[in-house]
Image (cartoon, rainbow, N blue to C red):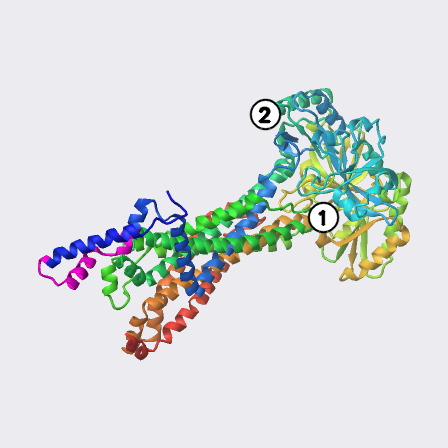
Amino acid sequence: MNLFRRPPDDEIDEELQSHILLRADDLERVGLSRPEAERRARTELGGALRYREECQDAAGGTGVESVVQDLRYGTRVLRKAPGFTGVAVLTIALAIGANVVLFAALNAIILRPLDLPQPESLYSVHRIAGKSAAQSYPDYIDLRDRNTSFDGLAAYDFILAGFDSGTSPTRSWGIAASGNYFDVLRVQPYLGRLFHAADEHGPNSAPEIVLTYAFWHSHFRSDPSVIGRVVQLNKHPYTIIGVTPPNFHGTLLFFWGDFFVPLVNREEIVGTPFMNDRGNRVIFMTLGHLKPGVTPGQAAADLDAISTRLEQDYPKEHKHAAVSLARPNLYGDYVGGPARAFLTALMLLGALILVAACANLGSLFAARAADRSREIALRLALGAGRFRIVRQLLTEAILMSVAGGALGLCGGLVVVRWLAAWQPFPQYPINIPVSPDARVVVVAAVLAIASGLFFGAVPIRQALRTDPYEVVKSTSRTTVERRFTFRDALVVAQIAICAVLVTASLVAVRGLTRSLHAHFGFDPENVLLAETVLDMAGYRGGEVAPMQKRMLEAVQAIPGVAAAGLISWPPLATGGGDSASVYDDAGAEFTPRTAAATALHFRVSPGYLASARTTLLAGRMLTDHDDTTAPRVAIVNTVLAQRLFGSPAAAVGHYFRFTEATRVQVVGVVETGKYATLTEVPQPAVFVPLSQWPSSDTWLVVRASGDPQPIAGSLRTALHDLDAGLPVTIESWSSGMDLVLFPARVASVSLGVLGLMGAVLSLSGVFGIAAYSVSRRMREFGIRIALGAQRKSILSAALGRALRLLAVGSAVGVALGVLGARVLAFIVYDATPRDPLVLGGVLAVMFALGLLATWIPAQRALSIDPLSLLRQE
């Protein structure tokens, strides 16, 4: 087949001319004049162009030249209708741009493996119960040394430390990793060297630090001479030995640290021993590469058997839970499950946007094909083949979809780059790891071409059934409308999809509003949080409590401060904290299996509950007398009181135990609140005096008499005056809750944007069908007005069809939204489409869209001048 050179036309033209001449000779012999005979012969032959193209196709086709002709003609046709072309291109750009952004996120977070050597064999170890990967250091050592399934098992934990390179100290997040961490992950240094297992010689034996490339670039301005320099972590000297490669940030996609230190030095930096404590699960994640031929199931069974033996050997310290393996990039199912579900749901909604756009364009394309019926009929009458007409319509559709796809891809990439640079929480090294690759471009191209074929195919049946004789002889366009057409079905489907998207967006907004105004068990309004990790300034042992007392006295002396207290971790501001096993006071066995409850464990100063405005339901508050010389006491929430003592009223004065030797008396009961997440079920919680359970890692909770922002500067100054070397982070409690509110806010914004896009598509769809109906029936409306028809009847005839389609589509969409209640409630906490406000809001939005979409067609229908219209006819 000759693709690039058109077969010669001379022989074809000579052959066609010979047929005409031979037929003219026959007609001349029967009595016709020569000119009349040749005219009759050409008429009987029909369209010479069609025969020429058929001959060329039979001889090898016109190839690329034919395609180029279609493209040129399609471009001219689209340029003659800039309004229609602009609307179509922007519509498809909107839909493809949304899908580009969503697929780029899905690709980067879910589909694309870690940028590490052999990522397909890298797995992390998780406990099925609780979906946690946490391990104690002794358990990790046993799993590492006893397993036969991994080439090596590495471990790491996140630490927060005061990083001092000679100037003022800053808060920095780092990763405390086992000595074999880089060897297991097969990472090579960018500069200097990395630490290895041979560098570890017991607790605090490897004061070495490896910087990440990003931190080295930002903090040290890519100075290669930093190798060998000594810096301080929490006032302890560490030698910089290397820099990691630019593309290596650890194995969690969303949490990037500034440095790496050996795990054996964690005790020195954090200040608490852990290497011999089998019950202290400080290791965040254990991970490694499977040996060749070993399946994840076999490796999980191997580790599970080791865990069972550890429980038998250490029944008091080790709590067995079935082991599973997961990809490390999203912390297994704990984060990966919700992330996959949320992104999948968004992709489905993005697909609905694209389907709605295609339905919209299909309806408009069919209407435009109907308006071009005379043109198509004339081309058929002149000999054009029906396949050529169909191919031309598809070419025009693909031209528009490719242009829209290119525009949508460019816009989507701009949004993706903004997301990649966005840091939603400056106090945490959390990043959105969205970076487009070739797959994103391929998906955009495929969606563009598929969309063009989809909506371009809508008028094919109409073109194939066109009778050129009937269309050409007609002097005016028909005004007869069938009851329900395929184009109407497309409009209904598009409006239904829009209603689903609007429902989802209103559900999200309603759920977020409820979340923000829910009762948390504390009042975050007018409260400042100041994180004060005294370890960062070198405070140890007996130095901690006096410094905390001085901090409280200094803060309480600030004008405008109503109350102040300390807590080990503020609820809903850190995403989680400590927990402890709680035992019945009369229990005889104290193992994890016999625990009465696992309670969230808060260490608080006497002023905390007043600062948080947590309601005391029974008993008394903690006081300064609850110190190391007094018996151990605690305040419990209602859930723990119910679980331990049967009712909150019966809890005060009774005892429970943390360990066999640690007996604690309940002196008060407070309301149950939200502590780690908004979606958590009511959790047991216990509040113990900070003086009896010392901790250098605390947060100041400062309640202001009014707006807290004016006292933020005074608070920082007061703490700086106490110790200029203490890094302090100050934020409002409401801002501190951004981390736990982040999923709900992202869902609300994402669904809101998709709902807005659906509304725009629905608006254009209803406008298109209304405008088309009015334009097709202009003569009819002119006659009606001339005969005295009322404005109401004209509006009913002009817009009734569009409004009926809007009503049907809205009803279908709302019904689908209600049926999908579980999915929508899963995406956004405390939200349901069965909420009367949501249902009313959806109906109001769809009604408003209908009025807006039909306004211009209605004005056009009412402004018809029957005399000028009939004069044109």
**Alpha-carbon neighbours of circle 1 within 10 Å: few (<14), some, or many (≥20)?**
many
Asked whether the beta carbons under mark 2 and mark 1 sit within 8 Å of each other, the answer is no
Tell me the tag on residue 297.
2
Write the residue at 74% across / 47% down: 570
Instruction: Give the percent coordinates (x, y) of residue 725.
Output: 88, 48
The image quadrant that residue 178 belongs to is top right
Q: Main secondary structure of the magenta part?
A: helix
Residue toward you, 748 or 513 = 748
- Left or right position of 389 against 233: left
Instruction: Give the percent coordinates (x, y) of residue 397.
Output: 41, 55
Tell me the tag on residue 517.
none
Is 37 part of what is drawn in magenta?
Answer: yes
Query: Which residue is label 1 attached to?
Result: 573
Going by the numbered disc 2, the residue's amino acid type is: Gly
Instruction: Give the percent coordinates (x, y) of residue 633.
Output: 80, 39
Q: Which secondary structure lies at badge 1?
A: loop
Looking at the image, residue 326 lies above or below residue 841: above
Looking at the image, residue 731 lies above or below residue 270: below
Write the residue at 59% across / 39% down: 112
Instruction: Give the percent coordinates (x, y) of residue 256.
Output: 71, 43
* Lower sequence index among marks 2 and 1: 2
Going by the numbered disc 1, the residue's amino acid type is: Ala
**Alpha-carbon neighbours of circle 2 within 10 Å: few (<14), some, or many (≥20)?**
few
- Left or right position of 348 against 12: right
Where's the N terminus, which quadrant? Answer: top left
- Find the residue positioned furthest to the bottom: 867
| Numbered range of the magenta stretch | 29-52
Residue toward you, 665 or 383 = 383
Residue toward you, 229 or 6 = 6
Q: Which secondary structure lies at badge 2?
A: helix
